[in-house]
Amino acid sequence: MIGMHIRGNRVEILTHDELYDIHMATMEVLEKVGVKVLEKDALKLLKDAGAWVDEKEGRARIPEYLVNEALKKAPSHVTLYGRGKRYKLNLGGYRVHFSMEGTSLFILDLETGERRASTYTDLERFFKLADALENIHHASITVKARDIPESIAHVYETYAGFKNTTKTIDGYTYGRTVAMDTIKMASIVAGGEEELIKRPMLLGFHNPVSPLQHSKELTEGLMVYARYKQPVIIAPECQAGATAPVTLAGLLVQQNAEVLSGIVIAELTSPGAPVLYGTVSTIMDMKTGNIAYGAVEAALINVATAQLARFYNLPSRGTGGGTESKIPDIQAGIEKAVTLMMAAMAGINFIYVAAGALESTLTASYEQAVIDNELCGMVLRALRGVEVNDETLAVDVIEEVGPGGHFLTKKHTLKHLKTEHFIPTILNRQTRDLWEKCGSKDLRQVARERAKEILSKHQPEPLEPSIEKELIAFIREVEKREKCSYKVS
């Protein structure tokens, strides 16, 4: 099983009474204000189930009993499978998993360091990098393949994922046709639709449009994935002070209404549909008018989101590792460390944006992904806490060494060293003299060299030739349908 279970105390900022207050305020919003649903089939499902629907406006006011019924049907744990049957993520409880960031439009070139548009080659390389990074559990679509026509990009990006990693990957839920294309591709890899339903391989995303709206395209995708029992993250991107109340409690109420109404749609579509209670919410920086993923308030929202997800007995998705820095620098380190550690200590089950993100996720960086992998390793060690038992208390070895001795040669030291201590791979703990003799390299230089080494040497487990051939044949069908093409590299 992949991931880390939190041991001991965890970070919480809301009392049970405060969680209940947020819940009751949310029910008031859903019943009195409602949500706008732009997908007509979803609106009809809500109406038939008992919601008060204004079809002309497309607004549904949802009674509390519908929310409660949906929550009873939604699974408390979700399992997502990688291409290889040995790899799976168990999302729920207090298990924590880290993901690469998703769908950046730009890249910091690994050779020049300059910012440029991302390509299909970059996407393949990021999947390969994620496959090799030991503390990254999920290989997301880190960058958009901007050299591929948009109408066929989804099939190429899905193909790139299945080809270049055995870890779990993202799905595509932007519209019914796109969602079905990815379902068909995953079915090829899984060995048929029934096998895909038994062993879900695609992680979908449904981002409500704040405030209080569900778009047509993403709701279509949500409903397709629900029917095929592929897990979907329902994660609003509320901005406090702009698309949500400036108070964090108010933002949490609105976010909760958006998430819960999405869950109602999913469960009405297909009872038992796997969903994750998610957030991409943060504040709008009032100085610049820009979103602030690296803000400490984003960390607080994630902690509260983890608590709300547990309040409803649902697995959670949050963000950690976001930054507004444009390069891998001290600002990036500060913002990433705070947001990542707090999300993990709160027990967010699936932490998106954990590795590779810069510039509010607009830009991805190979070097930053390597640095963030190291940070994730440190966080995972922190989650394990301090294990106290007869063996770790080490009274016998302390008596054996006695005053003035040392523990370097003791079997106890060798036995526990690698489990008790986090051993960094790129962080430098040398003396200054030795560091200077080795070239006085800063962390970005070391990370660049490590990224290049991985990309030149790491070979992901290949797809079975028959499966790869079938995937390419399906891509050709989509290209014919969309009247455009791109050559598979």
Image (spheres, rainbow, N blue to C red):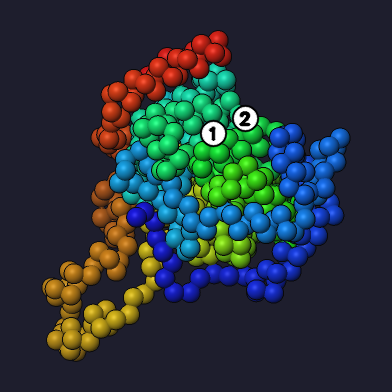
How far apart are the alpha carbons under marks 2 and 1?
8 Å
Q: Quadrant of the C terminus?
A: top left
Task: Please determine whether, in this image, residue 430 is positioned above or below residue 130.
Answer: below
Relative to 72, is 33 on the left or the right? Answer: right
Task: Please determine whether, in this image, residue 448 is positioned above or below residue 277.
Answer: above
Pointers 2 and 1 in contact (CB under 8 A)?
A: no
Q: Where's residue 72, x and y in %?
A: 60, 58
Relative to 4, is 351 on the left or the right? Answer: right
Q: Where's residue 167, x and y in %?
A: 37, 42
Relative to 402, is 457 on the left or the right? Answer: right
Say what secondary structure mark 2 lies in.
loop
Q: Which residue is mark 1?
A: 172
Q: What is the crowding at mark 1: few (fewer than 14 residues within 10 Å), some, or many (at least 20)?
A: many
Q: What is the crowding at mark 2: few (fewer than 14 residues within 10 Å), some, or many (at least 20)?
A: some
Task: Please determine whether, in this image, residue 478 is positioned above or below residue 404.
Answer: above
What's under tag 2, amino acid-wise?
Gly
Checking the image for residue 62, the label placed there is: none
Q: Which residue is mark 2?
A: 175
What's under tag 1, amino acid-wise?
Tyr
